[in-house]
Amino acid sequence: MPPTQTSNDTPPRARLPRSLAEIRAAEASARREIVELERTIAELERREGPVGDRAMASKREAEKRKAELNVLVQRLREQHDDGQRARRLRLGVAILALVGAGVLAARLVPTMTTGLATTTSAINAATAPFQSSGFGELRTSWGVEPTELSAVKGTCYVAVGSAADGPALLRVQHGFGTVEGRGSVGFCACTAEPIKVTPSGKEPLALRILTSPASAVGGADLFATRDVRPATVIPETVDRACAEDAIDQWMAGRSATEAPAPTPVEAKLAAFGARFVTVARAEDAFAVVPAAAETCFAAIAHDPGDALALRLSGGARPAQPKKGAIAFCTKAARQLSVWRAGRGLVTVFSAPAPRVGGVLGMRDLAERAGAQPTTTWVSAEDLAYDSAATLAASGMSPSLYLEAAALPRASVLAFSTDARSTVVIDAGDPGTVCRPQTVLGTMQALCLETRPGAWSPLTGLPTGSLAAQRPSWMPSAGTFDRPRLERMLDVLSFARRMTLAGFELVTFGGAHATPLGARITGRSGEKEIVAIALGSQAPWVQPLSDGAPWTLDDAPRVVPLPPGQAVDLIATPRPLPLGQREILVWRR
């Protein structure tokens, strides 16, 4: 049986030494560095407060280097042992030659050489894909004897076996269990533990162990989803925090991918002002969402049969798998990912939260573009921020916001509440109109009241709710004037789309009603306008144009208007008499 072979590749810094003296010196040096790193880690863990937060990155780097050194020490020790065994084996061969085994060797060498060449070629071919994907060779052994090693925390392993008649059967004792697999078995260590790998098959039989940091693999969960993966992957069912941490570390190094050819839904999202950020292709289990503050996202599944879920850093899944799009917003930059059950592409688009109108605005945008009904999520600490973003993008300034005690004066209500909220405004409530209709539990909605204080909850406003006075540009409604309020909700939705497109609602100066519509004068620093008229009677809203008519559901007519010049716009349908309408102008 040939001597044990040890790879000359070493993770992650340099090649392993060759002589036994060099091996002993390298091992001593590595152990000294490990001691120093342990002192550094202990010092970082004693720190508290902001200083400790800044030290987290240094602590992770120290732990990573320590894990690399542990692997190096293990390999140096194994190479030392292998070198000793090789010396003993060479001595035995020499003795055998001296006592007349030459005739027997002459008979066996051709057969052994052919078998060894076949198995060597097979093991090299079987491990090449793993090595190309970033795994380094730790150890190669021959025969049916078990290979034992001490797994290093934060490291993933692949055991690959080849026999004379094909892939070997591998028996891996890992933790408290034993797993068998043919050809290759992969696993990740969440703690330092002994591992025993026993191959079986027709000899010559080769076993090769490969390693990679768990942060480069993504831990046990992502191991099974990689393009190059073992035939059998041992899942991490005990230390889930370790497995989730490996995913987070893997995600931290990812970058956005190139956009695929847009679908009609995605083309509309882009036309509305949303920006493509990343994609999960068919071979990916999820899309990594770039961390961004004060940003909203919409994840769109290309295959309507695919279900999407949202994952937070640490492994929490606040949005469980569900068909349709997902809209979510974050005030602070945080690591998120969208996971897919299926094989279709998943694209992710983004927009600034204060411009799109928070989760409510992002959902409206996705559904207006043609996405399926959308799941929404916003963290508990961002609920009030999300409601404020909805009001801001709808054309309402913070000066209109009311304290809870002033609720009887409110005409506008913005909701962004979590699953603990018990607020429900009945669809038949004569005093309040909401869009979408509020439901028990998690919701984002914008409501208008037929008169101030029409809705007075017994328990007060839930967390994540904001009340506001009626803005001056919104005509006051008569009692129970629900059709008019429904149309005003259309105007607020239109205002959010205009805000995302870079327009600002201006309600003073530069616009005068005319018998057929309005005359609007250009202002300094602005080049384009969009205008509508709000009437006191049905049809309530008349878009203004210098050409073809349009509606709030269409792309608006953007009118070029240089500073100081005036343009006459025509209302469609025919406007109400002067004095019965107000002109709204969005300028850019």
Image: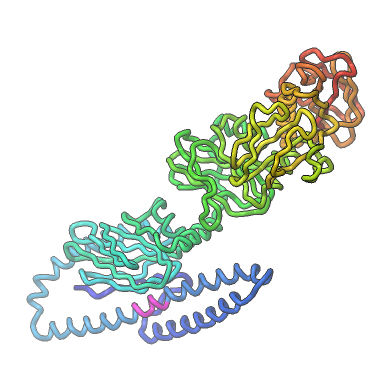
At a point 71% along the width and 47% down the height, the residue shown is 385
Looking at the magenta stretch, what is its main secondary structure?
Answer: helix
Q: In which quarter of the image is the N terminus?
A: bottom left
Residue drawn at point x = 60 percent, y = 47 percent: 420
Left or right of 490? Residue 409 is right
User: Which residue is pictured at 62% across the width and 50% down the height?
Assistant: 379
Question: Residue 192, located in which quarter of the rendered image?
Answer: bottom left
Q: Is residue 365 above or below residue 132?
A: above
Q: Could one spot residue 188 in this view of the protein?
A: yes
Image-based side of 187 in relation to 374, left or right: left
Q: Is residue 15 left or right of residue 399?
A: left
Identify the image's colour scheme: rainbow, by chain, secondary structure or one colour. Answer: rainbow
- Does 447 appear in magenta? no
Q: Where is residue 247 in the image (x, y as percent from the top left)?
A: 49, 57
Is residue 274 shown to the viewer in this render? no
Q: Where is residue 141 in the image (x, y as percent from the top left)?
A: 27, 70
Quarter that holds the C terminus: top right
Query: The magenta stretch spans which residues?
Result: 73-78
Question: Quadrant location of residue 75?
Answer: bottom left
Reply above or below: 15 against 445. Answer: below
Farthest front residue in view: 458
Q: How many marks?
A: 0
The vertical placement of 380 against 568, above or below, is: below
Out of 165 and 55, give the one closest to the viewer: 55
Q: Measured from the top left, where is residue 554 in percent x and y?
A: 68, 23
- Figure quadrant of residue 367: top right
User: Measured along the vertical axis of the image, is residue 249 above or below residue 539?
Assistant: below
At which x and y percent is residue 109?
14, 70
